[in-house]
Image (cartoon, helix red, strand yellow):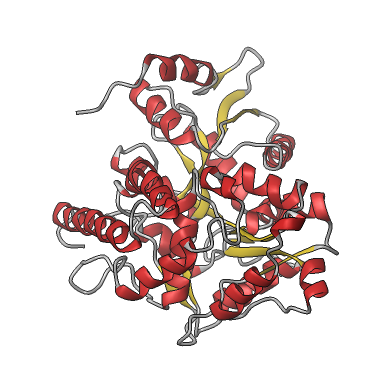
Amino acid sequence: MRRHAPIAALALAATLLAGCGSDTGSDGKTKITFWDTNAGPARTPIWQHAIAEFEKANPTIDVNYVGVPIAQAPQKIDTAIAGGGVPDVADISTSGLGNLVAQKALEPVDERIAANPALNGKFNEALVTTVKNIVPDHKTYIIPLSTNAGAFWYRKDWFKEAGLEPPKTWNEFFTAVDKLTKPSENRFGFTIRGGAGSIAQMLEVVYGQSGITEFFDASGKATLNDPRNVTALEKYAGLYKKNTPEGDLQNDYVKMVAQFDTAGSIAVMQHNLGSYQDHIKALGPEKVASFSVPKSDSGVQSVLSNPVGGVGVFSGSENKEAAFKLAEFFAAKDMGGYIAEKSGVIPANTDVPPSKAAHITEAQRVMNDPATKVVQMPYHLPEFNEITKTWAEPLFQKVLLGQLTAKDFLDQFAAKLTTAQAGYKQRNGGS
């Protein structure tokens, strides 16, 4: 039974819903709406430029841009689906794709890609496979645009002053973080994301240290509470207040960036390639660079799969042909390359020329290395986002505060995911 959205949420969504849907205006132009589900000062101008270029190339179509902050996007999309006021096209990540497909909200795009010479065979196969494996029928429900990679942004100038090289192993990482911590000078070696969005970053550090390469074992049991992961989480949580500011308990992305970029009090900040523009704008290329997830003690480079970003066409669109045109325009070589470059991420379209940016080159080196082990995050589980955000984030804070052991936390976390995985297999015939 679907819970009714709170009245305040419905009222807030009304503004968006008023701009949803599509029609033909008095000028004879087809009107469609695009939702940017991660809107903000860095991304909004990118989409607005892409839309303007599309409208130049397609003068009979008008596109209404609607920016939705990432924290509000899942609820707003669910509300739109329930109320019949979906956009025509939206920026969709595989992290939320399973939920949308379960609601039959998106159109499959396999036939559209196959029929378009600018797209057919032009996408990184690993990314396409990731998109298909999210859903039970293994169809493609978004046209891939880009993917991300975990990155540790660091102060080049501080490392140079301390005679340190970017760490390649976790032992080197913890040593560097400790050496660069100088509370008396308001300098800290690291900043932990303890608030919203903390779990994916925690998991990246945990699996990176342990070198475990599968989220579930052959029997379907989550590997989260493997003793090697427990030890890894204990070391990670041990940084809090020792090598990080005490305020990190409430850190979300905005607060982390403020500490790293604006206050200049942090030596290393964990995030992904997408924050490149923020760091460069604030600090400049002379002071900031990135290194990849360090190798485990056993020499394994174990990295988490990152969501694949793409564009999806909603089943409720009244002008699907125009909507598909927009999605395909975004994903083709020229615009796909532009969006990836300006966003600082890795393009999905393999026709896009190689990036000259050092952070992209390094991420692609790791991704393309046959020795790299990619731990596939369970985005296929409809419960995954709720478990990680609603349940896990508050308990992770208790781990940081010493009110809950790493083992107890991971035991409970693993049990929830094991149950969700078993339910998923049962619902989908063991696939």
Q: 216 or 161, which lies in front?
A: 161
From the top left corner, tell me how far across and down residue 276 is, in percent.
Answer: 71, 56
Task: Return the residue found at the far front.
Answer: 184
Task: Return the residue found at the far bottom.
Answer: 298
From the top left corner, tell me how far across and down residue 311 is, in percent.
Answer: 52, 45
Relative to 263, does residue 165 appear above or below in the rendering? Answer: below
Evaluate whether residue 266 shows in this view. no
> Residue placed at 61% from the left, 67% from the top?
350
Evaluate whether residue 280 shows in this view. yes
Q: 93 or 62, which lies in front?
A: 93
The reply, left or right, for residue 314 in relation to residue 381 is: right
Relative to 301, does residue 265 appear above or below in the rendering? Answer: above
Residue 228 occupies quadrant? bottom left
Q: 380 or 408, which lies in front?
A: 408
Task: Locate the C terminus by quadrant.
Answer: bottom left
The reply, left or right, for residue 272 in relation to residue 17 is: right
From the top left corner, tell me how far across and down residue 237 is, in percent.
Answer: 47, 61
Question: How many tags in the picture?
Answer: 0
Task: Locate the N terminus by quadrant.
Answer: top left
Residue 178 occupies quadrant? bottom right
> Residue placed at 77% from the left, 57% from the top?
185
The reply, left or right, for residue 153 in relation to residue 130 is: right
The reply, left or right, for residue 60 in relation to residue 240 is: right
Relative to 324, does residue 425 appear above or below in the rendering? Answer: below
Q: 387 or 20, which lies in front?
A: 387
From the top left corner, tell me how far across and down residue 167 is, in percent.
Answer: 64, 77
